[in-house]
Every structure is written in structure tokens, then in C-alpha cells.
Image: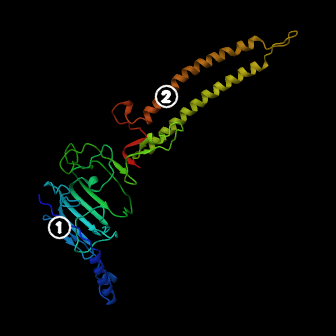
Amino acid sequence: MRIRKKKIQDQSKVCEEERKLVELEKESGKRQGLFQDPLREPIPSYEKAPSETVLKGSNNSFIILGRDRPSHFASGYGAKGATQASRIDLIAGFGSSYRHKDGSYGPPCKETLLSPNFAIDAARLYISQKCNIDKDMALAPVPHESSKGRSAIGLKADEIRLHARGSVKIVTGRGKFSGVGSDGERLSGGAINEVPGTISLIAGNATGREPLLEFDILDISSVFKKRRRALQPVVKGDNLLECIYDLTELIMSLRAAVGTNTMLIQKMDTLLASHSHPLAPPAATLPISSYIGITPLIQATSTSESLDEGMFFKKVMAFQDTFLTATEGRKSNPNPRFINSNFVFTT
């Protein structure tokens, strides 16, 4: 495979000449760009591959029809000779943040030959029949998710807006089509689409583990040891409501047990406070029958509370299995009442 390599030129002087031409034309009233008139500005040259058809606009906009190529000739499935790897590439602001040798940034002039680049192109819509979109766009990985060799659409710019006058849906998984066979809608390459896929909302393009804000004065390194994953599942609202409702019932049961225990302690305290041991002639003391009278109540209540404690423990364990365990009954089946989503994640 032949790879074209051309030395990147310092375009500062060339662009300076372009800027002088711009100033001259402005002074003469030509090509000022007002009211959508033509405008002279630096535009780099697109390094066209033999298999590509390129439509070039007058002001650094391109539409490229070709094969999968996120950047240079050796990138993408087009470089591997893969079939079924077509691509439509729309670029506005080609090489927009190109770094010149003098340290300045901006698109170079036409003497510089550039390939597409997600890092420096201003705005880009990349449509590919077969690509590794996360790698191509340098996106943080998501656990248990693969985006290799799949059809994809990549959209990148400084700011992106999705505005619907009605609703916006972000959906993964198979479409609800009829007449497509028992396996339903397949992947673009014909493989069975067995998993629903995930939705990840990632701020900062980082999905690794982050430190917890905890500090053990006896172990200074503890701040670096305790870490949690940055990309976490989104909580499911209805399941969380059920979880909180059941939790309040457990708290009320615990409150009742504590109230019963408090009542018994108060009765015993009253009896003990009324009891005395006279040193002189016998004085009025609390009859022993008063202690005997409360003993059956304490014993019966204690037995009942012991039984309730065992039942309370079982309820707590059932609560954990129901709402705080990802798999049903601690088995491999997904738990439909788990408070976290299995497929939607965010940082």
C-alpha cells in the first residue's frame, strides 16, 4: 500500500500575503463578503484519496464521498481494503485550529495539504458504513460496550444542539419492525442484534475511576486508595420510589420495636424508683407482687420482639435483594426492580 507523505509547510508568510490581499481587496471594495458576496480567506488544500469524490465550497467547506477514512490515508477501514465501508464526510472549517510553526492557530493557506482531522476541523458530520467511531473520535471507553466495525454517525463541533418542537428520543436496540424475521432488525453487517446497547452521557470525556473525598488521618495514602467509577448508572425513578416506600415501612417497624422497648424500660424504672430498703422499723415497701405482675409482660414482649427481630432481618435482606441487587435473587437474571438502570449511564 502506497502512503503519500508531504512535509507540512510553515504557512505564516504565505498567509501573511493572503491577509495583505484581503486588505487590498477590502480597500478597493472587492470580495468583502458583505451580503454573502465572495470573500478571500485562508483555505488549506484537501489531500484527496484516489477513491474519493470531493465537492469543495468557496469558503472552506467540503463534502467528501469515499471510503472509511477518519484522517490520513492509512486510517480507517478504507486503508485496510475493507468492503462495505462507504463514507460521507461533511466538514465546515477544514483545519480550523491548525497549529502553525510560529505558535499561532488557524487554517493554513492552499499551499498546505491536509487530511481530515477530528481534532482540528471546526465542525464535522461523519457518516460511515463501517468504522471504529469511538477510537476515531478519541472518546472515553464505556465498559462492556464495543463500537468496532459498526456503521456509525459521528458529529463534532464546538457546540451541538438538538432541538425538537415536540419530543426528543434517544433509543438503542432493535426497531419494532414487522416482516424482518424472528431475530428482528439486524446490525448493518447482517449479524443478530442481541443486546439493547447502552446510552452514556459523559461530561469531560473521562470514564475511569475517580478518588473518593475521604481521608484517614492514620493512613495518608487512603485518599488515593479509595476510588469509585466515574461513569455510573442512572437511577430509575419508579423503582426508587418503591425502594423509598419500603424503606419507610422498615423504619416504622423499627420505630414500633423501639417504642415497645422504651415502654417496658419506663415501667421497670417506675417500679425500681418506688422500691426501698428501710434500715429502721419496717416501712411501706413495694409489694413483691408488683414485680411478679410485670414479669409475664416483659417475658411475653421479649419473646415477641425476638421473633420480630428475626422477621425484621429477613425483611431487610429481602429489601436489599429487591432494590439494591442488580441481578434477581442474586442470580444471573437482571433484576427489574433494581433502582439503577442497566443500560443508561452518566458521569
Taking the view exactly as shown, the residue that stands out farthest to the front is 102
Q: Residue 130: which numbered mark, if any?
A: none
Instruction: Indicate the secondary structure of the residue bearing disc 2.
Output: helix
**x, y (%) of residue 222?**
48, 39
- Mark 1 is on which residue type? Lys
Taking the view exactly as shown, the residue that stands out farthest to the right is 281
Q: Quadrant of residue 226?
A: top left
Taking the view exactly as shown, the residue that stands out farthest to the bottom is 28
**x, y (%) of residue 81?**
13, 55
Q: Nearer the viewer, residue 12 or 29?
A: 12
Q: Quadrant of residue 71?
A: bottom left
Q: How many marks overall?
A: 2
- Camera-nearest label, 1 or 2: 1
Task: Tell me: 258 left or right of 323.
Answer: right
Instruction: Indicate the secondary structure of the residue bearing disc 1.
Output: loop
**x, y (%) of residue 134?**
28, 53
Residue where numbered disc 2 is placed: 315
Taking the view exactly as shown, the residue that stands out farthest to the left is 1
Closer to the chain start, of discs 1 and 2, is 1
Task: Tell me: 29 left or right of 339.
Answer: left
- Mark 2 is on which residue type? Lys
**Label 1 to label 2: alpha-carbon separation:** 68 Å
Looking at the picture, the colour scheme in use is rainbow
- Residue found at x 27% / y 53%: 135
Residue where numbered disc 1 is placed: 48
Quarter of the figure with the N terminus: bottom left
